[in-house]
Image: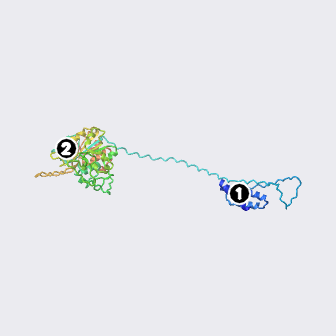
Amino acid sequence: MRSWIAARFRAAVAAGASLTGKRFGLLVASSIVATSAIVVAAATNQPEASPLATLLGHSLAADRTPVAVEPAPAPEPEPEVEVEGPAEPVSHESTPAPVHNIIPTPEPEPIVIPEEPAPEPAPEPAPEKEPREEPAPTPPPPKPEAGRIKHVFLISLVSSGYQAAFGTTGSTMPYLDGTLRPKGLLLSNYSVLSEATTPNGVATISGQPPNAATKTDCPTLVEFPPTATPSKAGILPGEGCVWPVATNTLAGQLSVASFTWKAYLEEMKDPTTGEPADCVYQGPEEEEKVEPGGYSNRLNPFTHFHSLLDVGECEEADVPLGELKVDLKSEAKTPSFSYISPDLCKAGVTGQCPEGAATGPAAADEWLAEVVPQILESPAYKKDGLLIVAFGGLNPPLPPAEGETPPPPPPNPLKTGAVLISKFITKGSNDAAPYDPYSLLRSTEELFGLNLLAKAGDKTTKTFAPELLGESGAGSGKKAGGG
């Protein structure tokens, strides 16, 4: 019997656990088994009812589930059963008489499920923090604006010396000295930085100083060493002909500020097809092959900067001279800044013109007489233009004729002079302040409201922009007439 009860107990526990959870199943099964055991024990008159209950109590106690159980109610007295007829004697040796007293099945003990602890109150939400005021975004810097001058035309030639152009004893450039000079301002002390054209053109559009490579006019485009580090002013030391992409130029400044620029180069052609082409220059290991009187990379400073070559600006804006005439017909098509250079012959380089034709300064003067009127008659120039006729290099002095004594060298062999023409300039005036290619860059940047690049930002670099901007104190050494 004990084994039967234990087996039923385990089966009931398993069944209860599969239905309602382990602890609840254990209580239900225990109640059922206990009830069954009591009934069986009573029915068979075995005295194991009490030990069995004790066994079940120990089994229940082994489960440590905190269950509160109410004490079982005291058993009610059994009701007396009346038997009709006379009582028969009972023989203990005979078959047991049927039991007339019915033992009531005790009610199962109530199962008390422990109360779940009351949930802890939710923490009160933290008071909302006041939104932190974000600092106002820094407004973008104001966009550069041009002053009264909104179109600048810069013509670059090669000089045979100041006296050849503006000498009092007779100029070899009558159109420049006799026609253009009276229309505007003569910079009588303008000087180039080197005899070579490459370093002067580079300085005019970037403020970078001459170096040993540029002073040879860069027959090959030598790169700067990768270790070259620019100064705080942006000046790159060392020797090279092509500046790295981090070196800025006037062209780059104009593009960023939403101004436009173009370089117009005469006779610029594709070396293979011979057709007009944009942004022509030799390869990094190639030596430039120059046809007599033709185009040369040394007259085109825009091909010396990776910041223009690598992003396609040179391809877009460095064009053959033939496009100038077309662009001048419309103010909308005329760039804010135009850089203009003829070929080697018409720039005034001695020995570059066909035999029998004008050469040197005379050839340059004839070219000016053809091109400058187109500029002065253009809508853009008439409205707000400035024309600059300057020199970007020197011819070597001619050897004296046989039997002649060479003239004494001038006190400033790099002095060339330059002419400015604009409706905002006093006609026939002269400015004797020391100007140079850095001055051309600084003045142009100030006219368009741009920052100053490299040597253009030196305190010693003179500017002619104040008068053109209508500011006071302009034109150091300026006077009318003279030379």
Asked which secondary structure carries label 2, the reply is helix
Image mark for residue 365: 2
Looking at the image, do the residues carrying marks 2 and 1 touch, with CB atoms under 8 Å apart? no
Residue 184 image position (x, y, % from top left): 23, 41
* Residue type, mark 2 in image: Asp
For residue 119, side relative to residue 461 (left or right): right
For residue 397, side relative to residue 90 (left or right): left
Cα distance in 3D space between marks 2 and 1: 125 Å
Q: Which residue sits furthest left?
A: 403
Q: Front-most of 184 and 13? A: 13
201 above or below 41? Answer: above
Residue 145 showing in the rendered view: yes
The residue carrying mark 1 is 30
Residue visible at 54% across and 47% down in the picture: 128
Identify the mark nearer the N-term, 2 or 1: 1
* Residue type, mark 1 in image: Ser
Q: Which residue sits furthest right?
A: 86
